[in-house]
Amino acid sequence: MYMPHIELAAEKLFILFGIPITNALLTGWVVVLVLTIVAILVSRRIALIPGTLQSIWEMMIEGFLGFMEGIYGSRANAERYFPIIGAIFFFIITSNWLGILPGVGSIEFEAHGAHLPLFRSAASDLNFTLALGISAMALVNWSGMRALGIGSHFSKFFTLKNPIATFVGLLEFISEFAKIISFSFRLFGNIFAGEVLLTIIAFVAGILTPAAVGSAQSLIMAGALMPFLGLEIFVGLVQALVFAMLTMVFISISIAHHDESPAHEHVK
């Protein structure tokens, strides 16, 4: 009897230049390739009088920029940080949705005497989400140093004004590492749990339809998976939005002066 393959860690496929290449890393490369090709194709088709597809993209970008402008308080800041926030969003959502396509997890690769999945959702590997979390918080602190200066930015964490300010600053410094953990485990937990759910549902559907063969069994399994695939599409979108929006908000807080919040800055 076929047993579902569930592995917490990403499986190592081969070694390239001394670097172990896992199926999650391979999927991440595919995501980068897909986004690069799409960016090239879209940039070549930009017209002064936009067509339907270009109009949709422009409406989405303008809406996103308007939302960012409300958070940052200025159009200039929204346009400055839009490329990196947009890149984070599209990279995560493409990775999440690519992970539920047919073939991801079912196409096998023979390595180390075992048959391993060739592709696996990149965000189902904790190394991937941890790298994203570290990158996001590095961007947050770099933005703060760029806007306020190195000394002013780090004085939020390390100050000797009074014992209370010193203690609060240390708590803020510790929270920077807690944010990395929160970023990493939130995305990893949701995507990995979704993969496990789809695997178990497919396995149970196969057990409950032993008499069906061929296309009939495939149709029954597809019907059983359809609601959960829709759920995973929604979860993938929400997780990409949450990651991008939290990065956006943390940057907004980081570039605000110590004595004012982003909201106060917007009122001014």
Image: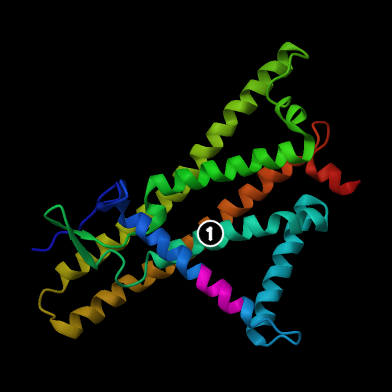
Q: Position of residue 181 (x, y in %)?
A: 49, 38
Q: Is residue 218 toward the left or the right of residue 98 in the image?
A: left
Q: Looking at the image, which residue is at 57% across and 78% down?
A: 41
- Residue projecting furthest to the front: 17
Residue in the foreground of this view, choosing between 92 and 111: 111
> Does 57 sit above or below residue 240?
below
Q: Looking at the image, which residue is at 19% across and 84% down?
A: 216
Magenta segment: 36-42
Q: Position of residue 141 (x, y in %)?
A: 66, 38
> Could one spot residue 231 in this view of the protein?
no
> Could one spot residue 89 in this view of the protein?
yes
- Residue projecting furthest to the right: 268
SS at mark 1 in the image: helix
Q: Is residue 106 toward the left or the right of residue 126 in the image?
A: left
Q: Amino acid at mark 1?
A: Val
- Residue projecting furthest to the top: 163
Is residue 37 rendered magenta in the image?
A: yes
Helix, strand or loop for the magenta stretch, by majority: helix
Question: Mark 1 = which residue?
Answer: 238
Q: Is residue 62 toward the left or the right of residue 11 in the image?
A: right
Q: Position of residue 21 (x, y in %)?
A: 31, 52
Is residue 30 rendered magenta in the image?
A: no
Colour logic: rainbow
> Does 188 sit above or below residue 167?
below
Please identify the quadrant where the N terminus is shown: bottom left
Q: Is residue 97 toward the left or the right of residue 84 in the image?
A: left
Q: Looking at the image, which residue is at 37% across and 67% down?
A: 100
Q: Residues within 10 Å of mark 1 (few under 14, many from 20)?
A: some
Residue 56 quadrant = bottom right
